[in-house]
Amino acid sequence: MALVLAGRLAWHGGSIDAADWTGTEALVLALLALTIGAGGIPRLGRAATVAAAGLAGLAAWSGVSASYSAVPALARDEALLALLALGAFLLGAAACSSVHGRTIATVGAAALPATLALALCLELRYGAHPDHRFQFGRLTSPIGYVNAEASLALLGFWPALVLAARRRGHPLLRALAFGAATLALATWLMTQSKGGAIALAASAVAVLVVGRGRLRLLVPLAIVTGATLLAWGPLTEPFRATENGTLVHAARAAGTAALLAALGAAAAGLVAALVDRRLRVPEQVRRGIGIALIVLTVGGAIAGAALFLVREPQPVGFAQQKWRNFKHTTVERQEGATHLLTFGSNRYDFWRVAAHEFHKHPIAGIGARGFGRAYLIHKRSIETPERAHSIWFDTLSELGLVGFAFALLAFGTIVLALGDAARVESLATGAFGAAVLWLVHGSGDWIWTFPAITIPFFALAGGALTTGRLVRVRPHTPLLAGITTFALMLVTVVPTWLAARLVDHAQGQPGTAAAATDLRWAKRLDPLSTAALEAQAEQAPTPGRRIALLREAVRQNPRRVELHYALGIAYLDAKRKRSARLELRRAQALDPDEALIEAALARAGARPK
């Protein structure tokens, strides 16, 4: 059920706005409460307990940081996000506390991305506007962010591949797993995500070095990779399409190619599964294949290095050029056959500012979600990111060493524990591959911030790390634990969700008595947010009332540039130019390069800076 909720969230935009996902979080925590209350308190192993403690600490410390964050409401949202991860982790452990627990977790992790990818490819093939799913020739939808779309698709790749390689599985189910893994690769290829490519390569190395039964993965890996490579041209064609009509045709062709590649891989997988049932490879032969694989890998690496040196006689200069490209942004729409070979981005500048903030506030950081406000002041690019595009830089700059310790405890423990499990059980290999992929991708992007990815990943991790047993307790203990979990959800999540719903409802009927009542209740339920005050200001009957409400919002959150700008415009509309200049100067101090503020200052009679 939790995976269904995550799929629904992903399909409807995968929003990072807490107003859009706190309702889903409430349902996830309610499911956890019901599962525990019914007697399903999972017996967590040492590693799972440490990871859960790390997530709980991360949630608590993010909540504490709301007291000094530039955006207290968003800091609270970060705490709720960590609480959601903890809830999904415990729900995965509770739901999979059975003999077939890891099988359930692996099937669920493979099925969710595959189902979304299948629906997407069908829409690309038969939908009226397939080009709307692309931006600059790269697949961004349904989640709305290209790298998040790639991360969610690839999350199911290794679980699907492990199921495809499982000899005891039914041939038809194994064939479906072949198709699911192919859809994952095809979807990633349509996104053209470099972060996804790096994460995929890192996870492949980790799985093939650590995972049990890695030799059995070679055939499924070869079939799935081969089917995807055969469809390379049409899958990457949208990136090369420049006109709208061309993009529509390219998008349809990409959807068709992905479906055909998945069908071809499923058919080949069915044949391989049937043959695998009757084929028994002697231990000596398998050992020889393993040695041959190592030799081929080393030989391929040497050959690749030699080929690189032949094509690039000055490797130092080549590396320096790529480093310069990484440090400086490039145009948003690159020309060429693929986006995967470009290096330009603004991540270097994001990480520079994050490192600067960590240096200034090493222990506690600047407060959860505070990076976006700091970047406006210190940026060297035209972007206005909310996060530093790295879970580690985000945590260090916003939560300091304290938050970093909790994050390392949670995420590091999950990956290491799954690695240990993968050495002794082939099913755990799928979860280990997904964990490495998520962590590597999240180290270079803001994947952590998307709840549509957080729910399935942590549910998979919890299910894979469960001991498969329940805790033996007194008869009424599960009920009390379930009630406590439900009460925690009611106190922490529901007020935020309900306040957002009330604000939305009030904005739909401006000026009415019902809207005024909704906004008053919204302020009481969520005192950290200024959304209700801003909505009241929009509906204010007089300029004076509007100014008073915006001044209250500014007092509540003095480091939000949007509020200072709105107050400055309100003063301008009321013909109070001196007050407008003062407020707009405060806004400009928080965002020195914003053209709208400069234009408003000119209207207020201020001299150009």
Image: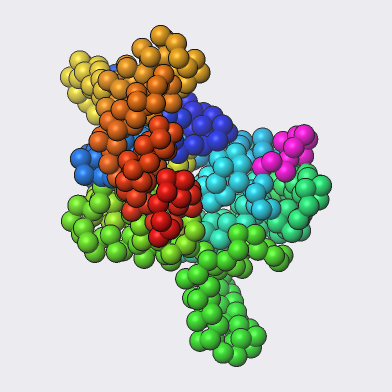
- 179 above or below 100? below
Residue 45 % position (x, y): 26, 42
Which percent across, then down, holds residue 504? 46, 22
State whether residue 430 appears in this view. no
Relative to residue 91, is residue 512 drawn left or right? right
Residue at the extreme bottom: 313
In this view, the residue in front, 506 or 336, is: 506
Q: Is residue 553 above or below residue 478?
A: below
Horizontal side of 492 relative to 184 (left or right) equals left
387 sits left or right of 300 in the view: left
Q: Nearer the viewer, residue 191 or 157?
A: 191
Quarter of the figure that contains the C terminus: bottom left
Residue lying at 69% horizontally and 53% vertically, measured from the top left: 137
Q: For the stretch drawn in magenta, what is the main secondary structure?
A: helix
Q: In the rendered image, which quarter is residue 230 located in? A: bottom right
Q: How far across and down, in percent of the image, does residue 410 sit?
A: 29, 48
Residue positioned most to the top: 513
Rendered location of residue 12, percent (x, y) = 56, 31
What's the residue at 42%, 45% (across, down)? Answer: 604
The residue located at (26%, 47%) in the rendering is 367
In the rendered structure, which segment of residues is drawn in magenta?
Answer: 123-133
**Relative to the observer, which residue lies in front, 106 or 117?**
117
- Is 490 in the magenta? no
Place residue 535 in its image quadrant.
top left
Choose between 93 and 483: the one closer to the eye.
Answer: 483
The residue at the point 71 percent across, 66 percent down is: 336
